[in-house]
Image (tube, helix red, strand yellow):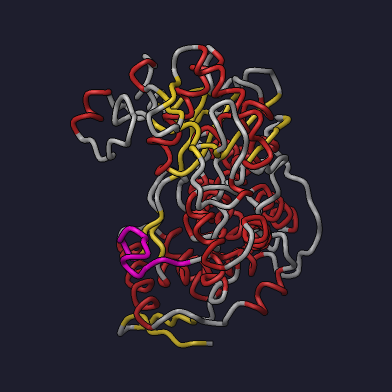
Amino acid sequence: MLKLYNSLARTPQEFVPIEPGRVRMYVCGMTVYDYCHLGHARVMVVFDMVARWLRASGYNVTYVRNITDIDDKIIRRAAEKGESIRTLTDRFIAFMNEDAAALGVLRPDAEPRATEFVPQMLDIIGKLERNGYAYAAGNRDVCYSVRKFAGYGKLSGKSIEDLRAGERVDVQEGKQDPLDFVLWKHAKESEPAEAKWDSPWGAGRPGWHIECSAMSSQLLGPHFDIHGGGQDLQFPHHENEIAQSEGAHGDTFVNYWMHNGFVRVDDEKMSKSLGNFFTIREVLKQYDAEVVRFFILRAHYRSPLNYSDAHLDDARQALTRLYTALKGFDGVAAVDWHEAHAQRFRAAMDNDFGTPEAMEVLFDLAGEVNRTGDAKAAAQLKALGGVLGLLQRPAVEFLQAAPASGMSNEAIDAQIAARIAAKKAKNFADADRIRDELKAAGIVLEDGPAGTTWRRA
């Protein structure tokens, strides 16, 4: 039975879908005015993994990941480029899809664009106004009255008083409370016509939060199973989605909330101001896309992900070891779920999508293949890797593309030190694993009286 960590309950919970055998899942996607970055890569890969595992578990999954194609940044960027908003967003949607495909991310079942769902947004805003949650502000925006919604803060664990004490938002003209947020933005004369829609409150465009409430409820219903996204969206975006959706429909919005952890670069928060901001395209110039996918999945989805060249190099060597075990096996195989390794793999994935433990199963199988040459073990390795979107290329193709030894001398010495420590602790399985990984990377170890030396093959 699958258990997942529900951010709303702040604890792992047994997953029980609303409709037996069917899962409806919505994930907040990208705002398309620039190239996707590593944070986007993690969201795409993580929830692709979640959808794959749900389907492997026998569920009929409807996976929706939206596209935000109208907001202030998009309007500004289109003006800077001297092009229409549609031309800008179409181009970056195409780039996003290229990046996702390179990372082995399957297309969601639906990829709604916000601009295609404005009537549904207006409908929800109308319901909120009738239910007493929405009001027209002095600046002609339509705002949500946060204090009217009794459950505000239940996802983030923040009370209204805590939010007011740590207030970081400016009091905009006409707002009844600084915490109130915009549902409908009144059009500015300077904004292009394509950024304006007619509404009962005058010409304007939707606020960001209302977009996801409208798209998710239209495509999945007002009450669905899983809502996902990056940890940075938990507050205020997802909190505001709950307030809007439950305020309009009078029902529970989502049963399970999932949030993936932040991406850090060399143990610092990734940001343009720090100069450590990387797009997916920049990373893929240096590393094979499957290596990047492997790197993302090797960490648990809720943990911080620390990007560095050393970690990517290590991921490349580890993936090389798996492909080395598959060298000579190019068959197509289905998972034998009755086999012991597959049962361990299932147990790991059913424990809140435990990909690190599932990866350990893959390495155990690779070790068995290396020791015995067993074709059934190789078939199982490839099939289980496929559940995670890995190991589906011919092994020779990957191995020829991978550098024989991209490891620095320092990285090799660190691995040797780890192997020596493992042997001293009588952890011979880890010692053998390290030797195998170095061998796969083209590093030959020689143990002698004076210690361990190495050379590049």
Residue drawn 25% across the image and 30% down it = 163
Q: Please name the predominant secondary structure of the magenta segment in the image.
A: loop
Query: Residue 10 in the image: x percent, y percent?
Result: 38, 27
The magenta-colored residue range is 266-278
Name the side, left or right, on which 73 lies relative to 203: left
Quick one: which residue is furthest to the right in this view? 331
Residue drawn 47% across the image and 65% down it = 432
Q: Quadrant of the N terminus?
A: top right
Query: Residue 405 in the image: x percent, y percent?
Result: 52, 82
Q: Nearer the viewer, residue 89 or 456?
A: 89
Q: Is residue 340 visible?
A: no
Query: Residue 393 in the image: x percent, y percent?
Result: 73, 65
Where is residue 6, by image quadrant? top left
Where is residue 112, by image quadrant? top right
Residue drawn 45% across the image and 87% down it = 455
Residue drawn 56% across the image and 54% down it = 364
Q: Can residue 265 be seen in this view?
A: yes
Name the side, left or right, on which 407 lies relative to 388: left
